[in-house]
Amino acid sequence: MKKIISIMLILLLLASCVPPPEGALPSPSPATEPSPSPTPGDPTPSPTPEPSSEDPSPPLPTPLELEEYTGPLYHAFFHFLIAFPEIAWSNSYGQNLDTDTVTPTEFRRSLEEFHRNGFVLMNLNDYIEINPDGTIQRKPIMVPVGKKPLILSFDDINYYSRNLGLGICDKVILDENGKLAMSTQMSDGNTLITYDNCVIPALEAFVEEFPDFSPFGHKGLLAITGFDGILGYRTQRDSPNRQSEIEAVRPVVQALLDAGWYFASHSYAHRDMAKNDLDRLKDDTQKWQDEVASLVGDTSIYIFPFGSRTTWDDPRYLYLIEAGFPMLMGVGFPPRDDPPFFRLRERYFFMDRWNIDGISLRREPNRLTPLLDADYVYSQEERNGVPRTTPALAGVVDDNGEIVYYERFAITVALGGDVQLDGGMGRRLRRDGPGAILSPGLADVFRSADIAMINLESAISDIGEPWPDKLWTFRANPFILDFLRDDLNIEVVSLANNHTVDYGFDAFVDTVRRLDAHGIGRVGGGLNLAEAMAPHVVEQNGITVAFIGAAIIANRVWAAGADSPGLLLTRERWYPLVYEAVETARELYDYVIVYMHWGTERVTEPTAVQIRTARRLIDAGADAVIGAHPHVIQSFEIYNGRPIAYSIGNFLMYNHYDNTAVVRLRLLGGRAEMEVIPCRVTNGVYNEIAGDRQARELREFWNSININATIGEDWVLR
């Protein structure tokens, strides 16, 4: 129902009758503004006539005609902009910018599209009312007649110090006139002040040009962390210039609030919700309240890093609500032709947001249609010439008819061999930290990869009894899960081996549940056969990578059943199941990586069964096959253009030899390229990247046993 705000008109009429305060100068009407002075040679202008007492008064502003909006609620979000594309494409960080952000031209065009499609900017706090008892209810949403409400949010407006000089701006500032702007230290040492290459001043300029886009004075929601300060100022507790940085950012924050911007918590440390237990979440939230809310003010809005979330009754959700964040935001496109997802309950409100970035513009243009036209928004020129319709798997054809793949679409996968941290290695890790069992450089191989995987060669539990009559049984302390997740950035583990059920099925189920609670994916084992066969799928740079695990070497009674926990085995009656899993994944995902547990311990040549199985896996659709169990490096092979590593030895498990390896896959253009990284093991427990001399000796030996493949001087298998 349309509601004309007549009160505004009455107030304006009354105001026109009130004389100005004593000493105030009346605003000149158009009739009393001075005429410009004549320039030499111009004819003398006619004298300006005196205003007539019958001249009409200046027109009053037209009051907004509002109506209640009852349609779908739209919430879109951006990151900071690729402020300097020519710099971004010259370094590896540009790959992340290309997928996660938009360019200045694309941001301007997005705003034009929002405006053309009838959206107006709203404040999320106008949607929800929080009652004194903590319950919440939805408010009527009032918009100008014929318009639609839009929430815009902007993630990670922190301008992290590690990314400066790589194609983004440095910080939000106030210029000499008190106007919001961006400051960037350029490579020549000069400081550049800009107004059009990042989200805050660019949106300010657009609203100034099109004030009807922000009829209520609202701008955007800034989701910020705190571990490296805010808005480009190093305000975190360990900053050497903390106090001066705090004083410098305060007027910027106030100017933002005055201009209609507002803030949300994006967590303090930008931790994935799925990888954050309750204690860590509490500590993280308290740090944000202490160091960030103290600068930007209280907020009821929490935006999950990575868009990650768990079940509605999760204690972490309940804690955030009790901590004062009843408005929770994720990331997610709605199903096709459906409105965006939101959920209103007694004590919380959840809303998904649409990401507008390189991925969505290239891969989800149709789903963006309610908001914008991706063909118009996408700026091929600023994207270093990459067409919008170019997926990473297809490439483009150059002038010579050759297919070209763009480096920044490449995905890296780090894979380590057996990990068994029971006993002495586990105690050393707990007592002395990660540096006691692996070098920082080797750890960095995993932390810097897009995806990291290992073979988990033990139960992780504090329950169960050793399997009867089994010579070696392993059960690691659950504390190692934090190490795998936080120090090595492990995304997925294979459970398909001869040790994960060492302490019985109760401990195995406990292991599964602990992995799930820590947000670590698992393959090759689960609570039933369907789980054991299911791939763990990661989407990176808009490309899907499916991981599958299976074992030949394992106790046959450990096989998962239709309704019983266990492993995916590949022998006897279970033999075809892994091929079925690979064939299914091949139809659904861009890449399929298979991790196998097989072979003969301490033997460097693969068995005939290994070779036959690996090649059948490739024929079924695997892009790469990785093996473990022998505890030594076995042959490498290229089969039908796909790499096979029959065994990559031990990664973090007591090693009887002074060498091992990890491999790094590079997924690009529908192919998997394998790089072998030789490693040196000291005293059986400390693993590091091998020195030049040992590396050369290892490459020479490995090439002598390889099948149809050679490891080159660049350590790439060909």
Image (spheres, rainbow, N blue to C red):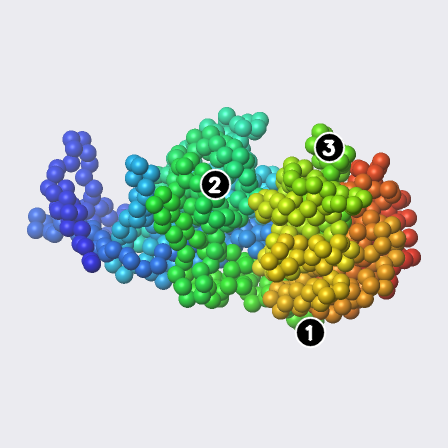
> Label 2 amino acid?
Pro
Sequence-first disc among 2 and 1: 2
Q: Amino acid at mark 3?
A: Arg
In the image, 63: left or right of 141?
left
x and y percent of residue 133 in the render?
31, 37
Say which residue appears at 41% left-offset and 56% top-offset: 341
* In contact (CB < 8 Å): disc 3 and disc 1: no
Quadrant for residue 43, please give it: bottom left
Residue positioned 60% across, 66% down in the render: 588
Label 1 packing within 10 angstroms: few (<14), some (14-19), many (20+): few
Q: For this rendering, which residue is in front, 496 or 414? A: 496
Q: Is residue 658 above or below residue 710?
A: above
Q: Which amino acid does the dot numbered 1 rest on?
A: Gly
For the N terminus, the image quarter is bottom left
CA gap between label 2 and label 1 equals: 57 Å
Other-residue count near label 3 (Cα within 10 Å), few / some / many at <14 / 14–19 / ≥20: some
Give residue 509's position: percent from left, percent from top: 62, 48
Per the model, the C-alpha gap separating discs 3 and 1 is 58 Å
Q: Are the two marked residues, 2 and 3, in contact with CB atoms closer than 8 angstroms?
A: no
Residue 188 is at least partly visible in this image: no
Taking the spot 80% from the left edge, 37% from the top edge, the residue there is 685
Within 10 angstroms of label 2, few (less than 14), some, or many (20 or more) residues?
few
Question: Residue extending furthest left?
Answer: 54
The residue mark sitting in front, 2 or 1, is 2
Residue at screen point 45% across, 65% down:
336
Q: Secondary structure at mark 1?
A: loop
Q: Which residue is mark 3?
A: 427
Up-down relation of residue 607 to residue 402 (above or below): above
> Which residue is labeled 2 in the image?
315
Q: Which residue is mark 1?
A: 401
